[in-house]
Amino acid sequence: MEKKKVAFFCVHNSCRSQIAEALGRYFAGDRYEFYSAGSQTKPEINRDAVRLVKEIYGIDMEKTQHSKTADEIPTPDIAVSMGCEVGCPYIGRAFDDDWGIEDPTGRDDEFFRETISKIEMKIKESFCK
């Protein structure tokens, strides 16, 4: 049976959605295919996100991921907004869920760790049952 495709969306696809893609693969990659995208891209994934996800989980996001727009990923079966303070990317349909997670960009490591922990909890609640 083909795995359902899950995509996480935020504006720049450089931090929260990238973390969610990495943790989705880590915790539930045997059950789902995980992707992330945004309405805009950044030249690289957020440095603090890369550093902390590597430190906490041993995942090197720079080796497996890059910033991309929605047209660069397969059409998802499940679409999750990470929380769009600025405005969510248009994906051609409604989101299945909005996790409402605040962008940690520019914040301290403690806030980043809390954000990563919230994303881990949401991944486990949503995809590891």
Image (cartoon, rainbow, N blue to C red):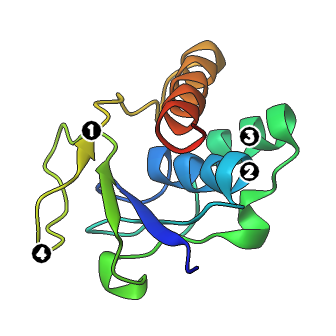
Q: Is residue 9 above or below residue 90?
A: above
Residues at discs 4 and 3 in contact (Cβ within 8 Å):
no
Residue for point 41% across, 63% down: 7
Asked where in the image residue 1 lies, by quadrant, the reply is bottom right
At label 3, the amino acid type is Val
6 and 37: which one is in front?
A: 6
At label 4, the amino acid type is Gly
For label 2, the crowd category at 10 Å Cα-Cα, with few meaning under 14, some 14 to 19 and many 20 or more, is: some
User: What is the x, y in percent for residue 102?
Assistant: 35, 28
Q: Earlier in the sequence, mark 3 or mark 1?
A: 3
Dot 1: element: loop
Q: Earlier in the sequence, mark 2 or mark 4?
A: 2
Label 2 to label 4, Cα distance in Å?
28 Å
The residue where tag 1 is placed is 83
The image's mark for residue 26 is: 2
Residues at discs 1 and 2 in contact (Cβ within 8 Å):
no
The residue where tag 4 is placed is 92
Of the two numbered discs 3 and 2 in the rendering, the one whose residue sits closer to the viewer? 2
The image's mark for residue 53 is: 3
User: What is the x, y in percent for residue 100?
Assistant: 28, 30
At label 1, the amino acid type is Gly
Of the two numbered discs 4 and 3 in the rendering, the one whose residue sits closer to the viewer? 4
